[in-house]
Amino acid sequence: MKEQATVFVAGATGNLGGKIVSGLLDRGETVRALVRPGIDEEKRTALDALRNKGLQVVEGDITDSPSELAATLEGAHTVISAVQGGPDLLVDGQVNLLRAAEEAGCSRFVPSDFAIDMTRLDDGDNVMLDWRRQAARVFEGSSLDVLSVLNGAFVEVMTGFMDLVDWSADTVSYWGDPDQPMDLTTIRDTAAYTVAAALDPALSGGGTVRFAGEVLSVRQFHEAVERGTGRKFTLRALGTADDLRAEIERRAARARSPFEYVALQYQWCMVTGKGKFETLDNGRYPWIKATSVEEFVRSLPG
Ligand SMILES: NC(=O)c1ccc[n+]([C@@H]2O[C@H](COP(=O)([O-])OP(=O)(O)OC[C@H]3O[C@@H](n4cnc5c(N)ncnc54)[C@H](OP(=O)(O)O)[C@@H]3O)[C@@H](O)[C@H]2O)c1
């Protein structure tokens, strides 16, 4: 019987997907990436570096027909999705990719979840996680092992996109309870945990695995930022969790796209503890030594 040894990755030109590919190649896996045509120069250069490490590249789009996609999946046992986008991609596109994986005889599918504990949320709490749960309901009927990898919030997002840290004003702002623990993981560590879980035969049957590089409250996060920079930051309260919910509703009412307020929805899910992991699976892979927020901040340029 022909051995199916390839790991297939969609989203390899993305922040997380590129690191997943790199981690798989470092483990000696045969890796094939689905890449959309027409990527820019910077992504092409990063992809070429992965090609030099052995990455196979096929052109395509997860919204292509399942039979077209199935041809690109030939010989793959595991499919990892690290795509990012709207419901057309996260629901329809990923279901399409799953159908193609079924047609190609793959065994395992890792959807692009990589979030706080979306299994504990209700519809409306976070639009992007609603889409993932919507896709998960379709995945339930699949013959493949569907393995959801959750990592809390990226440390990169907590120190950047979330707008919690103002690096020029030296402030850390927060909503809600500053002592509520939060699950935080760097992109690199999320990739390492994803690679370990995706290749783990003990996870046959699929399910959900949860990892956190560090669990910190906002107060502890603030202290880690201070230690990492060697500077003083003012901790600034913006309001209660209910005030945050009201702010989300105000913004949603005038938003043209949910992407305009979803960062606040992530914050609400975190500061209320609703998206907090109850258990962690870090112990499955003790060789992964996760980066702390302090170490991460210390490594930032400038
Ligand atoms: N927990 C957190 O704090 C956190 C924060 C950010 C992201 N995430 C999650 O991490 C995952 C990856 O996010 P990211 O930031 O790495 O995303 P990203 O950098 O925006 O990359 C998205 C990838 O998806 C690809 N893609 C988009 N549309 C596609 C299509 N139709 N067919 C095939 N590929 C397509 C993109 O390809 P092109 O290069 O062609 O555009 C790119 O490779 C997502 O699940 C995201 O929600 C989690």
Image (cartoon, rainbow, N blue to C red):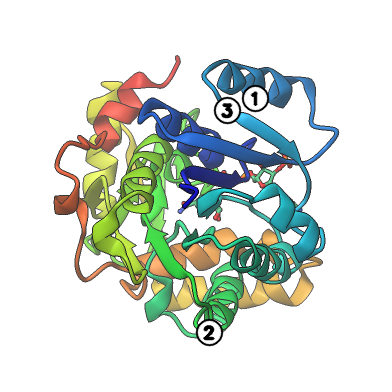
Give the Cα separation between the discs numbered 1 and 2: 34 Å
Residue 176 in view (yes/no): no
- Label whose residue precedes the other's in the sequence (1 or 2): 1
Q: Position of residue 121 (x, y in %)?
A: 43, 80
In this rendering, position of residue 178 left or right of residue 113: left
Secondary element under disc 1, as helix, strand or loop, is: helix
Residue at the spot of label 3 = 55
Check disc 3 and give the amino acid type: Leu
**Image quarter of residue 232:** top left
Residue sitting farthest toward the right: 38
Q: Nearer the viewer, mark 1 or mark 2?
A: 2
Q: Are marks 2 and 3 in contact (CB under 8 Å)?
A: no
Q: Are marks 1 and 2 in contact (CB under 8 Å)?
A: no
Name the residue: 70% across, 48% down. Answer: 72
Secondary element under disc 2, as helix, strand or loop, is: loop
Residue at the spot of label 2 = 141
Name the residue: 26% across, 27% down. Answer: 295
Give the Cα separation between the discs numbered 2 and 3: 31 Å
Check disc 1 and give the amino acid type: Leu
Q: Is residue 94 above or below residue 36?
A: below
Residue sitting farthest toward the front: 1
Q: Position of residue 132 (x, y in %)?
A: 56, 71
Q: Are marks 3 and 1 in contact (CB under 8 Å)?
A: yes
**Image quarter of residue 247:** bottom right
Residue at the spot of label 1 = 47
